[in-house]
Image (cartoon, grey):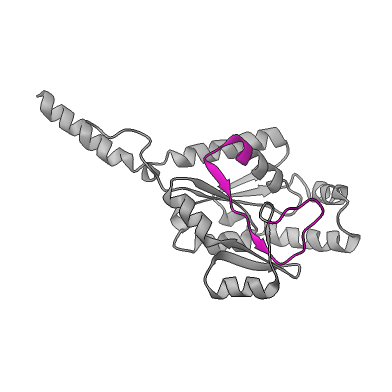
């Protein structure tokens, strides 16, 4: 009998990047809520928690010495310093999810995405970059949060242009003009990537089974 669809596949590493305020965090939450096959890579960071953030949910909040020890022990898939704080993705939960056929979503910047794409796990990466509809709208969104000073917002806007300059490194690039529309596009990308031939290991045995059935019927 031919192999059946649904045999275990290696999980995807879905990288979602954008300038701060372009919508990647909202899109990540929507995707996680809609698809139980996707888990979230909770980053480690040295920045202090913001009001309402919970350790282990939004981030693993650690000290700088603790973070540097994680780097030395090779426990992070990627890491970078942003606005004086360190951020990184723990390796073990991602590798466990991959081997179990579950996908992992990364809400990270271009530096982190580049490191993961260049890692031994890079073959399983699907990278998506989110652009804002305009820089004026991006600044409006940052100011509407009410979390940062004008100086911090100015720094984020300058960094945004540095982020945007790396758009061509990604597999898919989307402009966030309408949240529902771009949400549907992100889900479609994930669905299509899962259907790629090289991500369906059961197909080899299935086709062999078809050949045996043909020979037996002659």
Q: Residue at the left extreme?
A: 218
Q: Nearer the viewer, residue 182 or 72?
A: 72
Q: Position of residue 36 (x, y in %)?
A: 55, 38
Q: Nearer the viewer, residue 62 or 12?
A: 62
Q: Residue at the front extreme?
A: 55
Quarter holding the N terminus is top left
Q: Residue at the right extreme?
A: 150
Q: Nearer the viewer, residue 119 or 91?
A: 91
Q: Looking at the picture, does residue 106 appear above or below residue 8?
A: below
- Whether residue 162 is visible: yes
Majority secondary structure of magenta residues: loop
- Left or right: 144, with 53 as reference point: right
Task: Give the residue at x 65% y 58%.
Answer: 109
Q: Position of residue 44 (x, y in %)?
A: 65, 62
Figure quadrant of residue 108: bottom right
Q: Position of residue 91 (x, y in %)?
A: 52, 61
Q: Looking at the picture, does residue 53 appear above or below residue 206?
A: below
Q: Looking at the picture, does residue 145 appear above or below residue 213?
A: below
Figure quadrant of residue 68: bottom right
- Whether residue 175 is visible: no
Q: Judge whether residue 66 is colored magenta.
A: no
- Left or right: 86, with 209 as reference point: right
In this figure, what is the number of numbered marks? 0
Q: Judge whether residue 50 is colored magenta.
A: yes
Task: Give the residue at x 79% y 60%.
Answer: 156
The stretch in magenta equals 31-55
């Amino acid at each position: 009998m031919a192999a059946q669809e649904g045999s275990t596949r290696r999980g995807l590493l879905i990288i979602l990047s954008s300038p701060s305020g372009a919508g990647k965090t909202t899109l990540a939450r929507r995707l996680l809520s809609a698809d139980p096959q996707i888990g979230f890579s909770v980053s480690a960071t040295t920045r202090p928690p913001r009001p309402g953030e919970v350790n282990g949910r939004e981030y693993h909040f650690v000290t700088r010495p603790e973070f540097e020890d994680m780097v030395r022990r090779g426990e992070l898939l990627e890491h970078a310093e942003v606005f004086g704080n360190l951020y990184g993705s723990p390796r073990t939960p991602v590798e466990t999810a991959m081997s179990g056929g579950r996908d992992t979503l990364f809400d990270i910047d271009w530096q982190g995405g580049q490191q993961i794409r260049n890692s031994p796990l890079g073959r399983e990466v699907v990278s998506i970059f989110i652009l804002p509809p305009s820089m004026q709208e991006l600044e409006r969104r940052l100011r509407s949060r009410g979390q940062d000073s004008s100086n911090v917002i100015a720094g984020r806007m300058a960094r945004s242009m540095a982020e945007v300059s790396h758009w061509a490194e990604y597999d898919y690039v989307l402009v966030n003009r309408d949240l529902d529309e771009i949400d549907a596009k992100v889900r479609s990308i994930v669905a299509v990537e899962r259907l790629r031939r090289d991500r369906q290991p059961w197909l080899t045995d299935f086709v062999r089974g078809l050949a045996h059935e043909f020979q037996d019927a002659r």
